[in-house]
Amino acid sequence: MFEVRLLGPVEVWEGGRRAPLGGSRPLAVLAALVVHLGEVISTERLVDFVWDEEAPATAGALVATHVSAVRRALARVGTDEVIRTRPPGYVAELAADRVDARRFEELLAAGRSLGRTEEAADVLAEALGLWRGREALEGLGQSFARIEAARLGELRLVAQEESFGLDLELDRADGTIAPLLAHVAAHPLRERPRGQLMTALFRTGRVSDALRVYQEGRSVLRDELGIDPGPELRAVHQAVLTHDTGVLGTGRATRPVPAPRSGRTRPAPSHLPPDIADFVGRAEQVKWATELVRGVGDTGRTAPPIGVISGRSGIGKTALAVHVGHRTADLFPDGRLFVDLRAADTTPLEPADALARLLRAMGVDPDTLPSGVEELTGLYRTHIGHRRTLIVLDNAAGEAHLRPLLPPGPGSAVLITSRRRLVALEGAAHLDLAAPDEAEALDLLRRVAGAGRSWAEPEQAAEIVALCGRLPLAVRIAGARLAARPHWAPGRLVGRLRDERRRLNELSAGDLELRASLELGYSDLDPQERRALRRLALLDLPDFAAWIAAPLLDIGTEEAEEAVERLVDCHFIDVVGADGTGLARYRIHDLAREHARERCLVEESAEDRAAAVARLAASWLDLARKAAARGPGGATRHFPEPAAVRPLGPEIEEAVLARPAAWFAAEQAGLLAAVTHCADHGMARTARDLAGALIASSAALYNQFDAWSRAHTAAMAAVRRGGDVEGEAWLLAGLGQLRYEQDRFEDSYAYFADALRLFGERLPDGAAVALAGMGTARREQARYAEALELLEAALERYGDTGDAGARAGVLYGIGYVHREQGRGPQARAALSGALALYRASADLHGEGLTLRSLGLCDRAEGRYADAERLFLDALRIFTGLQDTFGVMYTEQALAKVELRTGRPAEAGRRLMRCLAVARERQDRFGEALALRTLGELRLAAGDTEAAREPLERAAELWAELGLPLWRARTVWDLAGVWSADGETERARAARAEALEVFRSVGGREARERAGDETP
């Protein structure tokens, strides 16, 4: 079904296909016409709509162009009659139900007319479900769009509040609280939803929360508008104060408290700590624990329900257990017992001491208690066996300490909290408690910080929560600090928390201190686990594979995996998934990592730390070198020889080398972190070598240039501080290659020239690399004479005994220059030499490149069958290497052969694949090349209108890249479009301009196109 969507980004869909509407101007034209559906909009009004008050002189003509672009886009999805010409302008003709905004308004009106019924609620839900974004007409900034977006946004709020009201009418208060909380937080000045939230809270028994919501609203209204709440909200407030169910509806019935048993002479023990008044979220976890505890006394049960809540320090394990204990108190008339199984910061409470505490709580005379664990266990089981008691065992260190404390029968329930998973505890159900989501963490921060705290910039609250890692204890401390300093803007705390080295110092308030909590967890670990955690935290890695613990700890890879998994069981490390090689990836929580790094600096010498990092770097470099040799892209040719390598076990190498590109992608962020660490800690050579490894990584293969640039910049600062001229030269060469990959050829040439100056005569191989890089940059710029001179100088520096792969690369460049200047025999000679060297070096990537280049020679001379054979050979090589770029460029060359041999359909399919890859990989040169060939294909088919757009875009890209020869070739093709469309003079001028470029660079087209200036 054809549909125009305005409730979010402006889009057009037909069935499962989306029309590619292009730039913002065509989108604005379509949106303006659809907003004024059925109304004829003059060209002048469209100009005002699209450009506001900044219309260019040619705006009227541009409107027609944009309308044509919209029609072409709509035609691609099978609809070409939506925008019609109606003097003095245009009109959008389609049914109202084909526009989501119109359907939304109709459903809203229908829902409001159906009264307080479930049908009305369903209709409003359907209306709200049409929204796809935060606001309507997203991405359009014109005045008409902002006005329409504001109008539709207001209707959306009305629909949401009508929906909340229906939910309350239909007794759905429980499910309404969470969306109402978010709605009120987003729109704090709207009084109706605030009253609805108070009503829902009252009905679910949360009277204090309802009153707090009112106080917050009154403060916001006074602060923002200087007014008090209106009469309706005040009436809801009064009804909450007086428990007026006539206004608010019926609240949840309060559970009766069981009467004490007859004959009881003392109250049932209740040792639970107080519940947290501002406990928020954790709905699923509370439900899990509550349902588990409610299983107490089930018929057929012969053992108590036991739940283990595990998680890292500060995650809220104890708070959850205590909260559930209070919620289920009526199930346990004989008491709720709580024991902290730590006697001191570093010493677990012995089972005998814990049993004695439990027995005393149940009223046993302390003077009659036996001293042995077995006797105490028997006495405990005798007393607890016939009781209905909840037992909360907090901070459990291990299964052995717990077993004596478990009741023998089904009448009691046990909740256990621990930093370890305690998987060996028989019959227990397990809950791994993770960090709450952002909304819950924000809610906690705001509650603790206080209702009067202004969050005029909500992004500051979000950043505080993020810097706390959403860890509830850290968030609570941050909120407490803000509450204690009402004169602080939240941004001030953000600034203090951003510094990782002082973050733990900042997360302290009163007797709450995050470092102390983390220290408790750290002290739970055995010495080897602590050492592993310290070393893994040393480099600030965002994530890692288990094998890195082997060089860090100087142990085997199997032992390293076991060490990491033990830390997973202790909740210091999280499993975040698997990488492309099939290896599990792990990460340490930010705050735990900072604490472990502190311990590493205190407990280990600088020499030991440096040695661990050096071993890891050497292992990375060995794997990277081997992966680069087998991976796509021929990246090994850009990988300088590292100072030291350290092989790992064969099983790790096998996993890596089977998927080298996937391994590089997984390790890229870690390599970058390692470069930064080594550069900051005086390990300049290691930083330089690791930066070189990034050139061979997915940074090069997938145009992820930021990592490449950051690594080289950090390493450059380190080698300059250390006076390493050779290292600086190699890094300059790496930056030159980076700029080449980014199609910034003049910058590339400059970096390589700086490297050449530093290499001088002392390092001929380095000088050859720099000369080859300079020549390659000039080659791409079509400065062929200069390129040839530089490439031949590079070949001379390498000599006959230099690196075969490097010499092959230079010969490839020389052959390229000869081919582009029309010297076929010289081109073939150089390329054949390159092919032989690549094959001798077993360099498949180089072989594929050269076969493609030889095929281009054949294609230029009209030997299409020979060219196609070579292209197919190259394509097989690149496909086998999984070299996406190699496949793309070879398919483009092959498509041109198919075009010239009368197979336009096959050529078109190849070119669309090429275009998709180039855009995905942000390869502007490849995109321009595919667009130009696509334009040639359409021009050859006589479809000049379809050819114009890709050719014009290609010409723009060539101009942006500073490549005049390629732009001239494309302009020559455009001249064919203009000539066919009757723009004879424009075509003649374009061809004359292009021919001048061909002559100035010495390109082969200067001879091929001579005499063709006249259309």
Image: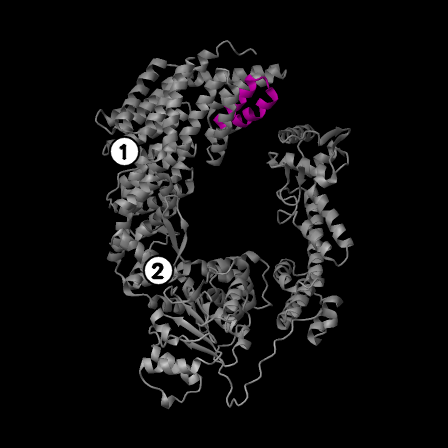
Q: Quadrant of the C terminus?
A: top right
Instruction: Inspect this view and state whether residue 210 appears.
Output: yes
Q: Nearer the viewer, residue 721 or 897?
A: 897
Q: Hey, what amino acid is under mark 2?
A: Leu
Magenta part of the chain: 928-955
Q: Nearer the viewer, residue 851 or 218?
A: 851
Instruction: Locate residue 352: give its quadrant.
Output: bottom left
Q: Which residue is disc 2 drawn over?
A: 567
Rendering quarter of residue 781? top left
| Residue 480 percent across, percent down from the top left | 51, 69
Q: Which residue is mark 1?
A: 766
Q: Where residue 804 sits: x, y (%)?
A: 25, 27
Question: Closest to the observer: 859 or 880?
Answer: 880
The reply to whether callout 1 and callout 2 are in contact (CB within 8 Å) is no
Q: Residue furthest front?
A: 300
Q: Main secondary structure of the magenta part?
A: helix
**SS of the residue at dot 1?**
helix
Q: How many marks?
A: 2
Which residue is pictured at 51% across the width and 90% down the height?
265
Question: Given the current orientation, which residue lies at the most extreme left position?
Answer: 801
Q: Which residue is depicted at the point 52% across and 64% down?
A: 282
Sequence order check: which comes first, mark 1 or mark 2? 2
Q: Quadrant of the N terminus?
A: top right
Residue 298 in the image: above or below residue 462 = below
Mark 1 crowd level (few <14, some 14–19, many ≥20, 10 Å Cα): many
837 shown above or below 565: above
